[in-house]
Structures are given as C-alpha cells and as structure tokens.
Image (tube, grey):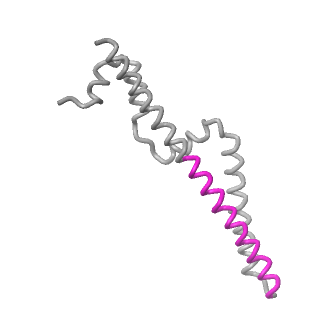
Amino acid sequence: MKSIDDEIRAVLSAEEMEELERLTGEQGIVDMIAETFRSRMRVWIAIVWFYGFASFAGAIWTGLRFYEATDVREMAIWGGACLVLVLVLVLVKIWYWMEVNKTSVIREIKRLELQVAYLVKSLAKN
C-alpha cells in the first residue's frame, strides 16, 4: 500500500521536490530564530531583542545595586526595580517564543498547502 507521500513524490518535478524537501526538513532552534528575522515582523523582532537585552542588563545592574545597598529603603527601591526588569524580560521572552511558534505553524501550513496542490496536480493528470 502506497502512502500519500509516495504518491505526491511520484508526480513531482525536480524543482517541486526540492521545494517540498526544503519545507519538510527539520529545523533547529537557530533556524527558527533566523526565520523570525526574515518575516514581516522583523522590525518588531529586532526591537523586542533590544528590549530583552536592555532588560537583562538593567536587571543585572539593579541586582548588583540591591546587593550593595546598605539602607532598607535603598534595598527596596533597587529590589523593586530589579523585579520589574525581570518581569519585563519574561514578558518579552514569552511574546518572542509565541512569534517563533506562530512562524513554525505557518511554515507547516504552507507545507500542507504545497502537498495538497501537488496531489491535486497529480489527480488532474490521471
């Protein structure tokens, strides 16, 4: 019994097969991150990365200031600032990974659309 993938591959030309292989190949985390920078949201992605790094650096700096503080009031201020910056960093990371997931889902949908188009093409030939 032939699988649907075998039927699709049987009717594909070389360039169609190459396109399908490009879409069906496994992506690593670096490839997923790079793909977000090629999307339409790349400007926002760059802004989010900037704010992520700034929040991280700010959290480290305020954490060190908290550690060096001698007064309770000063500790509360620096500790609160550090907490807020860590929360900003967490929110930025959650938003970014939702974008990575969205890009991955869109890629899979495009792959399925391509396979359906190839299947329709093969059925039209018969």
Left or right, residue 104 beside residue 61 = left
The quadrant the C terminus occupies is: top left
The quadrant the N terminus occupies is: top left
Q: Residue at x 70, y 44 (%)?
A: 44
Prevalent SS, magenta region: helix
Residue 14, quarter of picture: top left
Residue 114, quarter of picture: top left
Magenta stretch containing residue 87, yes or no?
yes
Q: Is residue 17 above or below residue 84?
A: above
Residue 125 on image: x %, y %: 32, 12
Residue 49 on image: x %, y %: 67, 51
Residue 85 on image: x %, y %: 72, 66
Is residue 38 or residue 123 the one in the foreground?
Answer: 123
Left or right, residue 107 beside residue 63 = left
Quick one: which residue is furthest to the left in this view?
1
Q: Is residue 114 above or below residue 66?
A: above
Residues in magenta, as a range: 72-100
Left or right, residue 120 beside residue 109 = left
Is residue 40 or residue 75 the one in the foreground?
Answer: 40
Residue 55 on image: x %, y %: 71, 61
Is residue 76 or residue 2 the one in the foreground?
Answer: 2
Magenta stretch containing residue 93, yes or no?
yes
Q: Residue at x 63, y 62 (%)?
A: 90
**Numbered marks: total:** 0
Q: Which residue is drawn at 62% across and 53% down?
A: 95
Q: Residue at x 39, y 30 (%)?
A: 21
